[in-house]
Amino acid sequence: AQSVTQLGSHVSVSEGALVLLRCNYSSSVPPYLFWYVQYPNQGLQLLLKYTSAATLVKGINGFEAEFKKSETSFHLTKPSAHMSDAAEYFCAVMLNRDDKIIFGKGTRLHILP
Amino acid sequence: GAVVSQHPSWVICKSGTSVKIECRSLDFQATTMFWYRQFPKQSLMLMATSNEGSKATYEQGVEKDKFLINHASLTLSTLTVTSAHPEDSSFYICSASPGIEQFFGPGTRLTVL
């Protein structure tokens, strides 16, 4: 069965510092992987997705993630945090096209001035 | 492109009444739509998957007679919460999928008094 584990329910970084949000997945076959961001009382916005093409995926707002099969990881990074990055971030996995998405529990990112 | 709308964005109702939430894909056709429920500070929990013209597939533990889902066209799915009770108060989010990626609506905040 598929599953997603996000390490750290809360992460705090200083403005301008590196952002690293961790995600590990469990899947019997190479899955599709996603990172979504959610601002308060809003729906989810796709940051980036991995669909078995390039292992380093670049997304919106300066975020990127690297698919590492050997580590079953798909960590999200951003070189320099901005105050507007403060939000909830969800890692998600999907086994097949048109299949349901399984979400991690989320990581709240706090940006310190 | 790829916009999903939900209506209403928030609703307050009395216990025992029914509430209908609409999910529309505005600029694409969605063969599959998903309904999620999100409690405060928690992740999204998939409630059901709906395919146009067929019965929805409910996740384990979700009462299909309480949460009625209709996917009448390739651009519209509705979720009706029947005989709502305070414990049904939550944030309901839909998503629509034209293929690999799911596009999420802005969510509907339901408060049952």
Image (cartoon, helix red, strand yellow):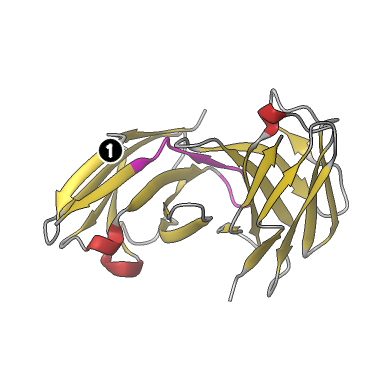
Q: Secondary structure at mark 1?
A: strand
Write the start and end of the magenta stretch as one range. A96-107
Residue A23: % across, % down: 32, 40
Residue B97: % across, % down: 64, 58
Q: Say which quarter of the image contains residue B7.
A: bottom right
Give left or right: position of B55 versus A47: right
Query: Residue A57 versus residue A16: which sits nearer the camera?
Result: A16
Q: Chain of mark 1?
A: A
* Extreme residue in the top direction: B61
Q: Which residue is mark 1?
A: A10
Residue A76: % across, % down: 28, 51
Query: Residue A74 versus residue A84: which sits nearer the camera?
Result: A84
Of the 4 image quadrants, the one containing the C terminus of chain A is bottom left
Give left or right: position of A14 versus A30: left
Q: How many marks?
A: 1
Query: Residue B54 versus residue B108: which sits nearer the camera?
Result: B108
Q: Say which quarter of the image contains residue A80.
A: bottom left
- Residue found at x 14% / y 59%: A15
Residue A4: % across, % down: 41, 35
- Whether residue A71 is situated above or below residue B95 in the rendered picture: above
- Residue found at x 35% / y 52%: A87
- Residue found at x 37% / y 48%: A89
Amino acid carrying label 1: it is: His
